[in-house]
Image: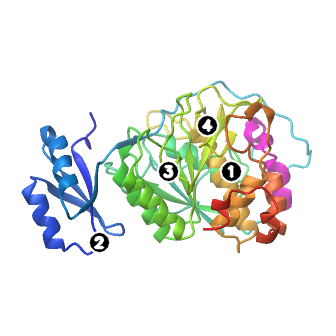
Amino acid sequence: MSEYSNQLIICFKPRTRRTTCLKTHREYGADLIDEIKELGHHIVKVPPNEVKSCISKYTSCPYVRFVEEDLYITTEPIDSTVEQTPVTTNNNKSLTNDPSLEKQWGLLSVNAHEAWGLSRANANLARIAILDSGIDQNHEDLRGKVIINRNFSNSSTVNDLYGHGTHVAGIAGAVTNNRIGIAGISFNAAQLMNIKVLGDTGGGSASNVAKGIIYAADQGAHIINLSLGMGTRSETLRNAVHYAHNRGCLLVGSAGNNSSSGENYPAAFSQVISVAATNKDNELARFSNYGSWVDLAAPGQAILSTFFNPSSNEKYRTASGTSQAVPFVSGLAGLIKGTNPRLTNRDIGSIIFQATDRLPELSGKIRYGKINALKAMELARIFSREKMRRHNIPPAWLNY
């Protein structure tokens, strides 16, 4: 049982007086502890043994639009995996001098090296919000990348004491070509926004994630990385996603690590790009979720990235999960935005979909294919909406 198990989220109907809302809470024995004002949602605590009865009361209330539990949302633990052997690039003239680049098989798999040569991206133009367990801002390969810090978790610090957020951040946006550590797929085209929504054990509440999404949108994020999830649909999260999408954000979420077709939220919402994980053989990773609701795939098995371990000096770690696949897509989106700043969230989503490789190994398991950074960059440089309409692009990404 989580600390949020007796929290409820109440959405009152429009134009309901605040005095009426507060009176309703008092009558039902609920304590108002927080609000998501942008959505008009109230977060209340109720006695642990009265959760079901309070839900029933709020559901029957004529002033209430909906009530739901403030569900626990989490990310998979960061488990170290096998040490990576060097990979061989097709281009001997690498654009980056990061010493561990040869161990980053995922970048080679999505043709990132060739994409970098084509991009000519503006440095630090894109803004990627990492909604996670925080980011180690003193990490040697992330120093200077974080431009905004905000803590919505139950932790006393905005910094990462769990490691997951730092690992995700490095895949998307590690400082590149600095003779240190690894390369981020966005190749210095993106800045990072550290929005901590998960506590120091890797979990948090749906309401905190919703607040983080809204905050990221209001602070001008172009891309929101959601390497987290839960198996239950939340209207509060759906409303937050809608809020951010309508303000120009591209949202990217993890399909989940249950080896099933079960939906994972918020990734399963239509306004979020849902990402499965692949291995070195371009197969769906054994742990990855799949299904017609999953949009595309990216490398997610044995991925080397930045890490923070409070009990050691470990600065880098290989780890696996759809959490690791998501920042490949978020970072690619940042590279595209840096290359063509005029592109909207819908444009960038269309480009990424159109550029996927429809691999036989993934046929019938996801909607499209595995991301291809080079093809995406080629499209980004010549993009026009009329050209994209001639291809099989999801209407949702063109005609909002």
Read off the magenta span.
Answer: 100-120
Q: In the figure, residue 330 lies in which quadrant?
A: bottom right
Q: Residues within 10 Å of mark 1 (few under 14, many from 20)?
A: many
Mark toward the viewer: 1 or 2: 2
> Which secondary structure class fits the magenta region best?
helix
Q: Which residue is mark 3?
A: 135
Mark toward the viewer: 4 or 3: 4
Query: Mark 4 and mark 1: span between their CA atoms?
Result: 28 Å
Q: Amino acid at mark 2?
A: Pro
Pointer 4 or 3: first along the chain:
3
Label 3: which secondary element = loop
Mark toward the viewer: 4 or 1: 4
Query: Mark 1 and mark 2: span between their CA atoms?
Result: 44 Å
x then y, percent, for residue 267 = 53, 47
Pointer 4 or 2: first along the chain:
2
Q: Amino acid at mark 3?
A: Ile
Mark 4 touching mark 2, by CB under 8 A?
no
Q: Which residue is mark 4?
A: 291
Query: Mark 1 and mark 3: span between their CA atoms?
Result: 15 Å
x then y, percent, for residue 393 = 73, 57
Pointer 2 or 3: first along the chain:
2
Foreground residue, 331 or 169? 331
